[in-house]
Image (cartoon, rainbow, N blue to C red):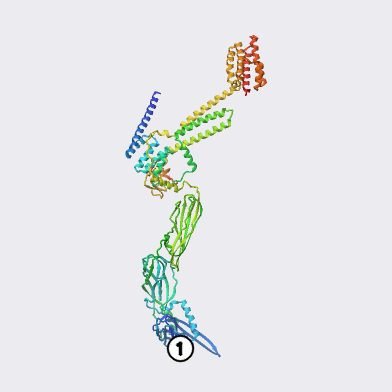
Amino acid sequence: MKQCFSYILVFLFSLTCMAQSSENLFQSANSQYSKKQYQQALTKYQKIEKQGAVSPLLYYNMGNTYFRLSDYASAELYYERGLRLSPNDDNLNTNLKVVKARLKGDIYPIGDFVIVRYWYALSNLFTPFAWLWISVGLFVLCCGGFSIYYFAFQYKVLSFYAFLALLLIFVLSVFCGISRDNRLHNHNEAIVFAEQCSGKDSPDEKALDKVRIYKGSKVKIIDKDAEAKEWIRVQTTDGQQSWIRLADIQII
Amino acid sequence: MDFCGFAQTFRASAPSVIGVGEQVRVTFTASSDKVSNYLAPSFGGLDVLSGPSTSRSSSYSIYNGQATSTSSTTFTYVVSATHEGTFTISRARANIAGKIVYSSPITIKVQKNPTQSQRRQSNSSPYQQYYNNQRQQAQHQQNPQQGRKQVTVVDNKAIFLRASANKSKAVLGEEIIITYKLYFLVNISEYQANSMPINKGFWMEEMDMSRNPVMSHEVVDGRSYNVVTLRKVLAYPQKSGSLVIPPLDIDVVALVPTYSQRGNVSTGDPFFDAFFNDPFFQQMTTSMSYQQVKKNIKSNSININVSALPKTTDSNFNGAVGSFSFAGKASILKCKTNEAVTLRYTISGNGNLSLIDNINLKVPSEFDSYDPTIDDHINKTQTGMNGSRTFEYIIIPRVQGEFKIPPVKFTYYDISSHKYKTLTSEGFTLSIAKGKDDGRGLSQWLSEREKYAKRDIESLQSGSANFTTMAHWSYDILLLVIIVVACAIVTAVYIVLHRSNVKKNSDITYVRFKKANKVVKKRLKKANRYLKANQKEAFYNEVAQSVWNYLADRFKIDKMSLSFEAVNNLLLQQGIRQQTVSELIDLLNNCEYVRFSQDNQTDEQKMAGLYSQAIKTLSDIEEQIK
């Protein structure tokens, strides 16, 4: 028991330690950025990233650094990574548009279906972690509501409906949380880094060229080549599907 | 077969006076149908246009009981003279019915304009002339080549190529039709153009010629030529000045007849002689071999004076010359945003249609417009280029509202009036309704993209990054399940416990007690204690005291003024039922009675009964107030 406790203590200590050192590194990188030493700042940011520390702000600053280094595709990649964590961040959204406008691969996207858009907007309101506690709170309210309905002499119908509504919201919050979690952890989107690559009909170099995909194009990974693992089937934002090389992309 | 009956005659006939270039017939008539070894005369400078054509006629008549048979053979030539003078046609020779006969020579006088009296035929009846006329015409139509048997030398007169333009003066861009015609007297087996002339300063439109050119006849310098149009070109001068259309150069293979006419066949046997000298047989054996002669010929070149167009400041003029009409049409006048509208502007008429490459259409900026597609219906005919050229613009409205497509002006140089003319198409008013895709349209996306391409990124954020681990960004479904299950269990346990309480509450006394006023319970608490301690006197005293105190407090009256009657009246006034009031009076009476009775035998049961009666009565009062 005592041993177990000490383990936990050590773990927690190391966590705070890591967070502390990451934070320090982050601040020094930021100051280097403001001194226009972008390359050095970038090295530090990358170090933080390797430590496994997660923050939308880190991705935002990395994106900015890449932008200043004129590596627009990488900048786009990091803004997208930041948006994965924090989809409603204004700065990230603005800078993503700025960087996309400078890339050739940006094509007119086919928007999602309206319901899908609303669903994403709803589930993007909170982080998965926040959704978890919202779900818990809602369930507690549900239980209370049920008890009230069960024992009440007056307003029995009203309290029943209230209970049902709470239950529904709880279920919705669970789905929101799971959906958000999925999108956050499912790495099924990528940025094309090759200057220009041709989307093939099938996973074969000799196959027919179907579409031209340019640098900076955001693609959705649909399928992976089973054998060679060299090709992936992607869908561009205009809905076209084709096979391209795995080496040509960077997964968000 | 009476070839001794008449003297055989061979008569030549021709008009004595003819005009220059006039075609006249020269006939040699033999008075028998048995004519062989005909030898043509020399025409002494006259051009033989056709001939000889042979015709035979025979008639049989019975007159006054006497049968007469006449027959004749006529050799006909068509000749003409190229210049004035006197020409002598020499004697023609023929073997008529076995006898060599010569015709007499004829002298023809060629004048510029012979008078009618002079032209009178010297010796031929009007009927015969008519007959010959008819025959000659028929032969001309059927077999025009016959007239060329005479031509054996392929010179510039036998074949030549002539280029002609329908005008020698033109303005810039005016249509000129250039025709290349091949004139020939000899047969032609093939021809081939060596090189197409390079025409500097002209825009050329070749006209489609049919594979098998139609042959026509034309008289040049008094000779009837066969004429084939080889090539027709529409030329549009592109610069002003004196321009030359260079000659066309072709190779022609001519078929030249070689005469291998045999003389009189004399075999010694009169029968065979007669056979071989038969005219039919002779025709078979003569003039049927041809020689192929290749010849390179060139057409003449054409000079054309091109004058510049008068100066114009009209920006709508883009080189159209001719005579045109102009019309515009919109596919639809009412539509939704992002739906395509087609505008068609058609120029039709005669002139350099294919050189008109754009029109002056100004599309409002609210529309996306694309380069026009050109749809041609152009015919190149004998009179030049005519038809229509349509410019089709596809425009896509991006914004809703009413928009005016201004009228389009088309200016051209009118050939017939030598003036610039401006035609105006009608303008259109397009009303654009809001379409489905509005607000997320391509144009908006593009303009937004353009806006973002110009701006810089937002500045760096240097606040605390609040680093976390990825666990902080996950929805831990296991944790949720644990919490949810725990909550559910807690609720279930609570509900079960509560249910057992409710079962207990089904006991009426307990319910009453529970429902009664807290004050009642509190007041009777002491009495309850005495009851349990079995202190009889204290118990009754306490119950009575509690009830009196309750009434005094509850109805805010002085304790001193309380009596049975007062309480009775008061409670009834407050709306308490009679029964409850009498129960209360009973209860108080009981308490008094037991208190003063000194009856020690009163058992515990009685006390408990009184206690519960007190609770019930007070609770009833409490319920009935209000």
Q: Position of residue B277 (x, y in %)?
A: 43, 83
Assess disc 1: are there few (<14), some (14-19) or many (≥20) residues with their C-alpha within 10 Å of its C-alpha.
some
Judging from the image, mark 1 belongs to the subunit labelled B
The residue tagged 1 is: B9
Q: Amino acid at mark 1?
A: Thr
Relative image position of residue A242 (x, y in whole percent): 42, 47
Q: How many marks?
A: 1
**Residue in the picture at 48% in, 41% down:** A116
Kind of element beneath mark 1: loop
Observer-nearest residue: B565 or A151?
Answer: B565
Work out whether B1 lies above or below B554. Answer: below
Q: Nearer the viewer, residue A165 or B455?
A: B455
Quadrant for the C terminus of chain B, please.
top right
Q: Position of residue B171 (x, y in %)?
A: 40, 67
Asked if residue A241 can be seen in this view, the reply is no
| Residue B173: % across, % down | 41, 65
Q: Is residue B618 visible?
A: yes
Name the one closer to the observer, B28 or B323: B323
Q: Up-down: is B269 above or below B472?
A: below
